[in-house]
Image (cartoon, helix red, strand yellow):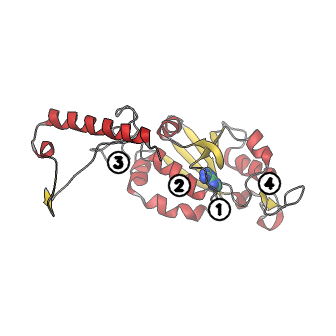
Amino acid sequence: MRLDIFSLFPEAFDWLQTQRPVQNALKEGNELRLFNYRDSTPLTGRQVDDAPYGGGAGMVLRVDVIDASLQAAYGEGVRPRIVLLTPTGRLLDDELADELVSERHVALLCGRYEGFDERVHEHFADDEVSIGRYVLAGGEMPAMVVADVVMRKLPGALGHERSAVEESFSQVLEGMPEYPHYTRPAQYRGWSVPDVLVSGDHERVRLWRMEQSRARAEQFEKNPE
Ligand code: ADE
């Protein structure tokens, strides 16, 4: 897939691009491209925002600036699925991540300041996504969260021996949280690893893990926070 990220701070994504799952996904032929609204703004002095009509605090990202950045990136060609990061959008979960990863091409648009002119929401966005009901200073961290969850789902992103298929909330686990993991030492301060995990009996291990996931799911339903 191709993932484009539009932001005023594309350098914020430098770290993301050093991460192994992202590098693996890119090696598999996927793409991650960054765009700076300032590089294509039609305004002088690389201006991208303006004071809100009607008054009030803060600045608003201009609709003509967003239009120009999409035009510069895509021209009259086929547009990707355009996703705005906003605190009031659809809450990100594993299902939404699966939906995005099934797209050929997705663009994430990061807001800053007071957000986007309303006409951006109305005329350019296919979706609005939130990572939680709180307001961050901008959409960069939310976009990084979306990029992380989506890219690690791409085939080969976690290396060939691992996959995101059997992770918490995945379809394989029937949407349940993942079972607990243990590693060496088998004994530590009297805290021991469950016997079944060192039994070498793969079927018993599988059943135990499903059971654990189920118990966690019940716990989770009682107290989802
Ligand atoms: N932009 C600011 N806050 C946000 C949030 N919680 N989710 C997505 N985008 C945002």
Give amino acid for label 3. Answer: Leu
Q: From the Cβ of disc 1, is ligand 1 less than 8 Å away? A: yes
Above or below for 205 versus 31: above
Badge 4 is on which residue?
62
Badge 1 is on which residue?
137
Question: Residue at the location (88% across, 60% down)?
Answer: 55
In the rendered image, residue 120, in percent from the top left (x then y), is placed at: 76, 45
Give amino acid for label 1. Answer: Ala
In the rendered image, residue 3, in percent from the top left (x then y), is placed at: 55, 46
Badge 3 is on which residue?
158
Q: Earlier in the sequence, mark 1 or mark 2?
A: 1
Q: Earlier in the sequence, mark 3 or mark 2?
A: 2
Question: Residue at the location (34% across, 41% down)?
Answer: 216
Q: How far is disc 3 from disc 2 in space, using C-alphas? A: 17 Å
Under circle 1, the secondary element is loop
Report if the CB atoms under discs 1 and 2 are less than 8 Å apart.
no
Name the mark nearer the viewer: 4 or 1.
1
Q: Say left or right for 29 vs 144.
A: left
Is residue 84 visible to the viewer in this orientation of the structure?
no
Under circle 4, the secondary element is loop
Numbered tag placed on residue 144 in the rendering: 2
Q: Nearer the viewer, residue 64 or 58?
A: 58
